[in-house]
Image (cartoon, coloured by chain):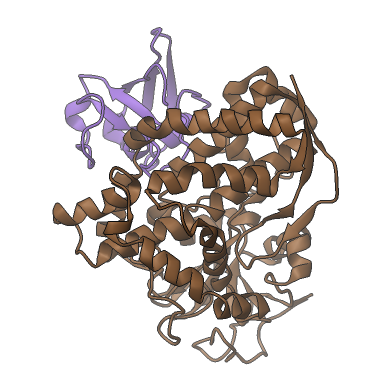
Amino acid sequence: MPIITFIRPDNRSESIEARIGESAMLAATRHGVDEIVAECGGNAMCATCHVYVDDNWIGRLAAMSEAAERQPNSRLSCQIKIEQELDGLVLRLPERQL
Amino acid sequence: MVTTGSTRVGGGHAGAASGGVPSGIPGLDVDPFAIEFFENPFPTHEALREAGPLVHLDKWNVYAVARYAEVHRVLNDPVTFCSSRGVGLSDFAKEKPWRPPSLILEADPPAHTRTRAVLSRVLSPAVMKQIRDGFAAAAEAKVDELLAKGSFDAVTDLAEAYPLSVFPDAVGLKQEGREHLLPYAGVVFNAFGPPNQLRQTAIERSQPHQAYVQEQCQRDNLAPGGFGACIHARVDAGDIAAAEAPMLVRSLLSAGIDTTVNGIGAAIYCLARFPEEFARLRSDPSLARNAFEEAIRFESPVQTFFRTTTKDVEISGCEVGVGEKILMFLGAANRDPRRWADPDRYDITRKTSGHVGFGSGIHMCVGQLVARLEGEVMLAALARKVAAIEMSGPVKRRYNNTLRGLESLPITLRPV
């Protein structure tokens, strides 16, 4: 199973095992990464699973489908589908979701 | 209560296309649109979940799902389970809809994708940031006013009064005629139900409410800067046709008020019944948003919606033919012990992500951010200003084919 690392604003990090085919949001909430709120449950509506994708990984993810909000490396983690090729993915958590 | 489905013949209102219910699908003799059910739906919800992943409701000759996994699956497969034949029991392929179908709720991709994008944009996270302070100030003022009163009816004076004090202004509606808004929404949500007394009476009396809503949806009647004007502005941008804009404003007026009334009502009813949870909220008002979300899971103000199968499909081992209505019990899914630990407990720190109180998938409530904003700022104001919420009279339930909520909830607020 691919490993994903979440890095908090204070640089504390947490690496979790994700299942292929699930979203990074689901992987995070399954493992209790509380900074991922995910109010809408994965429907790209609430913007409370926002992450900043690490520079080394941004080129390997699909572009955002919606108009840009916040930064170019912003993604909704419910829209990041886990594949084996994303083993080692690093996602930075924002200060707050709302 | 449970029968096996091998020998009965279909052909009632919903019309089993195959002429009968396949064997192996349990049939239940329950009516989820009856007054006795509305009073206490939970034992029936459990019976529906325990009977199987797919059941048949003999009374209305319709299939139903009540477990979380199946409800979630049906919601998230709009190609197989369509909305364009109506999201109530009435099949638009067989019956004339009681009003022109909604361009968003009662539509499928690709038509739905275009209209959905318009409303998503009008009700986006960025727009919520602009309206947040105004909504919060109105909630503070409302709680101050109610504290001065002391004892009042939490349904009319709070759950209805607060959304009515912010949402119509946000849409840009005129002051006159707003008394039609709640009755109109009541008709809309009764009309999703079967042809029972509630639905028939509501539609018979709907004409003045329909006339009001149709008029207010016109561009000239909507104040600049409001949600309504923003929808009409998408016509100028070429996103929608001029004739579509009033219909999308109608969606806001259909689904934007009674739903939040019942959501806020559910939250107040929860906090009044579970004072230890209100105490936790008081000690940390930042829990307000989740306390509201958990009330949506716990009470599920929108109880049910239907879909229609577009092809033969297997649901958890059961075959369903094309053209069949499937009733989804959102409220039962939100308390399915297969998905939720201690589901019958109202817990304001529960991880609520994934509940289907706002639906799920492409039709998930487009106004959910407005609903959460209203709920959060109201509960936060109560948490800061109120020491205790006490029930001070008999609780009366309101009966609607789709909406779960109260007619009357007498309470007394004690100031901090």
> Along the line of sight, which residue is nearer the eye, B64 or B129?
B129
Residue B383, percent from left and from top:
66, 25
> Along the line of sight, which residue is nearer the eye, A70 or B255?
B255
> Along the line of sight, which residue is nearer the eye, B89 or B384?
B384
Q: Which of the 4 image quarters holds residue B38?
A: bottom right
Chain coloured brown: which letter? B
Position above or below: B364 against B5: above
Residue B413, percent from left and from top:
76, 31
Residue B399, percent from left and from top:
69, 65
Residue A66, percent from left and from top:
23, 41
In the shown orientation, is residue B223 left or right of residue B299?
Answer: left
> Along the line of sight, which residue is nearer the eye, B349 or B38?
B38
In the shown orientation, is residue B89 left or right of residue A24?
Answer: right
Specify the quadrant that holds the N terminus of chain B. Answer: bottom right
Does residue B138 appear in the picture of this structure?
Answer: yes
Residue drawn at point x = 37 percent, y = 42 percent = A45
Position above or below: B3 against B243: below
Q: Which of the 4 image quarters holds residue B69?
A: bottom right
Chain coloured purple: which letter? A
Does residue B342 appear in the picture of this structure?
Answer: no
Residue drawn at point x = 61 percent, y = 27 percent = B381
